[in-house]
């Protein structure tokens, strides 16, 4: 068997994708399409955060949309109320989400299965209703305007520059996820995912490990939300409803919850798929749901599982 021949495409693929990522914004002429590229990168960051909890730790969380919202509103309030510079407000929004990840994770991660899912749904609804009804703090349904970190001229130019910022953060998040999986913490997370009782009997502090994963997930979710706020320059509670959490989970599952590359691929695919189906008008959500369901049935291990199967069949 020609193992060298099978390794060559796998080695070339990351380089080809890297070149495509660099040149893509210069091939795009529409400001709307450029904005979609930025949003795809932001979804990648949020989905990679979810990978820590769902993929590595095996805990089914539906709170990522809430952490996304906390990051966005944390950035906005730090800028408007405390006049933080954009970079520090960005990190502050992510850290605020991580803090809530700690506060929520300590009690809820003692739950399992559908009880945990219900608890995270409840947390998401609390965040959504708070943002909508605390008008004195969040301006309620009217939302908040966000100050851009820089203004290079046109909206297109701003989005093109911000695209590379988002890509850099997404690459760093993917690299961190890969390193964590190969570390002692990653092995502990996988042990908890495969058999929590056996992991506990071997000395793994299961609750602590799960809380750390929840905080990492919340941090990346909050970071993605803060970057979304800077990209949009306006936020309102309507975007941060339960549908956002569902969409991020579906992105991870379609891509492959056990794979960093799968998380990236799922976020990009489902980030663009609704736009590709817009021409269907009133029926596009129906077709979108049917396509996602079909992908889940045909590819139970996601796009990553399909890729691994294709590569192994050539060896």
Image: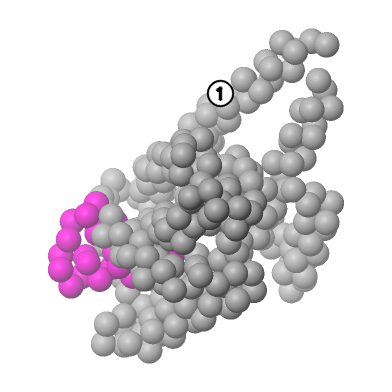
165 vs 42: above or below: above
Q: Does the magenta stretch include residue 75?
A: yes
Left or right of 214? Residue 85 is: left
State the image coordinates of residue 215 (x, y, percent, origin top left).
Answer: 40, 59
How would you classify the magenta stretch by its main secondary structure?
Answer: helix
Magenta range is 67-90
Quadrant hosting residue 57: bottom right
132 vs 257: above or below: below
- Element marked by disc 1: helix
Q: Which residue is drawn at 45% across and 55% down?
A: 205
Left or right of 4? Residue 59 is: left
State the image coordinates of residue 1 (x, y, percent, origin top left).
Answer: 83, 11
Q: Residues within 10 Å of mark 1 (few under 14, many from 20)?
A: few
Q: Which of 308 and 89 is in front in this view?
A: 308
Quadrant hosting residue 214: bottom left
Q: Which residue is drawn at 42% across and 58% down?
A: 208
Return the residue at label 1.
15
State the image coordinates of residue 282 (x, y, percent, origin top left).
Answer: 74, 74
State the image coordinates of residue 305 (x, y, percent, origin top left).
Answer: 74, 41
Q: Residue at x 38, y 52 (%)?
A: 155
């Amino acid at each position: 068997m020609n193992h060298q021949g099978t390794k060559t495409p796998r080695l070339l693929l990351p380089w080809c994708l890297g070149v495509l990522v660099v040149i893509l914004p210069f091939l795009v002429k529409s400001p709307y399409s450029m904005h979609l590229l930025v949003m795809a990168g932001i979804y990648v960051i949020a989905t990679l955060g979810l990978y820590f909890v769902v993929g590595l730790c095996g805990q089914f969380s539906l709170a990522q949309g809430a952490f996304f919202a906390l990051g966005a509103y944390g950035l906005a309030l730090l800028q408007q109320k405390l006049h933080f510079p954009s970079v520090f407000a960005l990190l502050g929004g992510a850290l605020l989400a991580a803090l809530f990840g700690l506060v929520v994770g300590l009690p809820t991660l003692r739950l399992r299965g559908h009880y945990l899912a219900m608890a995270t749904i409840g947390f998401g609804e609390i965040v959504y209703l708070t943002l909508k009804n605390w008008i004195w703090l969040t301006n309620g349904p009217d939302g908040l305007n966000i100050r851009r970190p820089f203004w290079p001229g046109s909206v297109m130019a701003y989005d093109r520059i911000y695209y590379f910022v988002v890509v850099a953060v997404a690459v760093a998040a993917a690299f961190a996820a890969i390193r964590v999986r190969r570390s002692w913490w990653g092995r502990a997370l996988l042990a908890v995912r495969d058999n929590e009782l056996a992991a506990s009997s071997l000395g793994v502090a299961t609750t602590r490990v799960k809380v750390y994963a929840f905080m990492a997930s919340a941090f990346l979710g909050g970071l993605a939300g803060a970057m979304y706020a800077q990209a949009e320059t306006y936020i309102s509670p309507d975007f941060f409803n339960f549908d956002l959490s569902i969409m991020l989970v579906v992105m991870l599952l379609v891509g492959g919850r056990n794979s960093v590359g799968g998380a990236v691929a799922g976020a990009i695919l489902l980030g663009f798929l609704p736009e590709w189906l817009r021409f269907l008008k009133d029926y596009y959500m129906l077709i979108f749901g049917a396509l996602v369901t079909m992908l889940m049935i045909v590819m139970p291990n996601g796009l990553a599982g399909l890729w691994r199967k294709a590569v192994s069949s050539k060896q």
